[in-house]
C-alpha cells in the first residue's frame, strides 16, 4: 500500500481550473519530487493534501481518505509541511517556534497547565528534549535562543523545516525549501533531507526548482504544467523528456521532421 495516494484530484476557483485530474502515489520512505513551471499547481497539491484547500478527488494517507478533514486533523495523523516563506512567529525564539510544532503531541489539559502539575512539568521536559534533538539534527545549536525575526532568510527557512520535523511526522511536504538559500545553505539542506531519508526512512513530497538537487536526490519526479500531469518517472527519464523541456523552456524541437523515402 502506498504511503500517500492521490486519485483524480481537481481544484477550481470559479472558472479557473488549478488542478485537472492529478493522480500519483508515493511509497514509504520515498523522496518524491513535484516540479513544474511557476503556476503549474504544485503548491495547490500540497494545500489539498494538508487540508488548506478542498478539492475534488481522493487523497488517501495509509489507505484512509483524508480529503475533507481539517488541517489540524491531518497534522494530527502525522502529515507535516513547510511553506515557501517560512510562516514563522518572528517575535519568538527558534526554540519556541519549534515547540509550536509539537502542538499535536500535547496531551495535557488547560487546568493541569494552569496549576503546573507534575504531569505537565514532565511533559514539558519531554517536549523540550525532543526539540533539542531536532535542533541538533539540523545544526541550529548556536541559534536556539535567537529571535527568529532577526535571523537571515536562509536560517528562517531552516527553522521552518525544523518546525515541521518537530511534529514527528510520518510524511513531510516540502514547499520549495531551498528557495532563497545560498549555495552553502542548499548543500546543508540536501544533507538534512538525505539524513531524514536514510536514517529515519521519512517519506517526503518535495516541490523544488533546483533541477540539480532534484537530479541528485529524488527517487521519482512528477511534473505538472497548467494543473495537468505531463510526465512521471526517474530523474534521468523525466529531465530529458521533450514535453518537460518544452514546458520549462517554451520551445519544441522542430528540426526532427521525418525524412521522405528515396523509394
Image (spheres, rainbow, N blue to C red):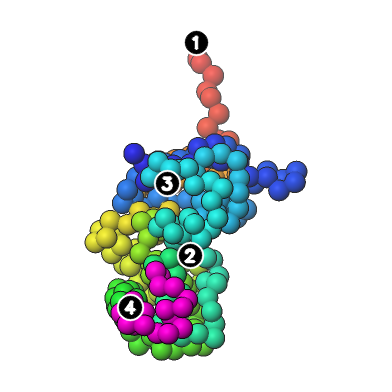
Tag nearer the camera, 4 or 1: 4
Q: Are marks 1 and 2 in contact (CB under 8 Å)?
A: no
Q: Tell me if mark 3 has few (under 14), some (14-19) or many (20+) residues whose alpha carbon lies within 10 angstroms of its own.
A: many
- Residue under numbered circle 1: 263
Residue lying at the far right in this picture: please name it.
15
Which image quadrant is residue 132 in? bottom left
- Residue under numbered circle 4: 119
Q: Is residue 225 magenta?
A: no
Q: Main secondary structure of the magenta part?
A: helix
Q: Tell me if mark 4 has few (under 14), some (14-19) or many (20+) residues whose alpha carbon lies within 10 angstroms of its own.
A: few
Query: Gap in Å between the C-alphas at discs 3 and 1?
Result: 59 Å
Tag nearer the camera, 3 or 1: 3
- Residue under numbered circle 2: 82
Label 2 or label 4, whichever comes before in sequence order: 2
Q: Secondary structure at mark 2?
A: loop
Tag nearer the camera, 4 or 3: 4
Between 217 and 88, the one lying in front of the other is: 88
Q: Residue at x 36, y 83 (%)?
A: 117
Q: Is residue 200 left or right of residue 79?
A: left
Label 4 or label 3, whichever comes before in sequence order: 3
The image shows residue 245 at horizontal and vertical percentages of 52, 45
Residue lying at the far top in this picture: please name it.
263
Q: Residue at x 75, y 46 (%)?
A: 14
Q: Residue at x 54, y 19 (%)?
A: 260
Q: Tell me if mark 2 has few (under 14), some (14-19) or many (20+) residues whose alpha carbon lies within 10 angstroms of its own.
A: many
Q: Secondary structure at mark 3?
A: strand
| First to last magenta residue range | 106-124
Placement of 254 over or under 71, stated as above or below: above
| Residue 211 in sight | no
Amino acid at each position: 500500500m502506498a504511503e500517500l495516494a492521490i486519485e483524480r484530484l481537481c481544484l477550481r476557483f470559479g472558472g479557473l481550473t488549478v488542478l485537472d485530474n492529478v493522480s500519483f502515489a508515493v511509497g514509504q520512505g520515498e523522496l518524491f519530487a513535484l516540479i513544474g513551471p511557476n503556476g503549474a499547481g504544485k503548491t495547490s497539491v500540497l494545500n489539498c493534501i494538508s487540508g488548506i484547500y478542498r478539492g475534488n478527488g481522493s487523497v488517501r494517507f495509509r489507505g484512509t481518505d483524508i480529503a475533507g478533514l481539517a488541517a489540524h486533523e491531518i497534522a494530527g495523523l502525522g502529515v507535516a509541511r513547510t511553506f515557501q516563506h517560512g510562516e514563522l512567529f518572528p517575535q519568538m525564539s527558534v526554540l519556541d517556534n519549534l515547540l509550536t510544532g509539537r502542538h499535536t503531541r500535547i496531551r495535557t489539559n488547560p487546568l493541569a497547565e494552569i496549576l503546573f502539575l507534575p504531569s505537565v512539568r514532565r511533559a514539558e521536559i519531554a517536549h523540550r528534549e525532543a526539540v533539542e534533538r531536532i535542533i541538533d539534527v539540523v545544526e541550529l545549536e548556536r541559534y536556539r535562543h535567537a529571535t527568529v525575526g532577526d535571523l537571515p532568510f536562509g536560517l528562517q527557512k531552516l527553522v521552518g523545516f525544523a518546525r515541521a520535523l518537530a511534529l514527528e511526522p510520518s510524511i513531510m511536504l516540502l514547499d520549495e525549501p531551498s528557495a532563497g538559500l545560498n549555495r552553502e545553505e542548499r548543500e546543508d539542506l540536501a544533507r538534512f533531507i538525505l539524513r531524514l531519508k536514510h536514517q529515519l526512512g521519512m517519506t517526503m513530497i518535495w516541490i523544488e526548482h533546483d533541477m540539480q538537487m532534484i537530479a541528485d536526490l529524488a527517487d521519482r519526479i512528477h511534473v505538472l504544467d497548467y494543473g495537468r500531469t505531463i510526465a512521471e518517472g526517474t530523474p534521468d527519464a523525466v529531465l530529458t523528456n521533450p514535453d518537460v523541456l518544452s514546458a520549462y523552456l517554451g520551445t519544441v524541437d522542430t528540426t526532427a521532421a521525418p525524412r521522405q523515402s528515396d523509394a
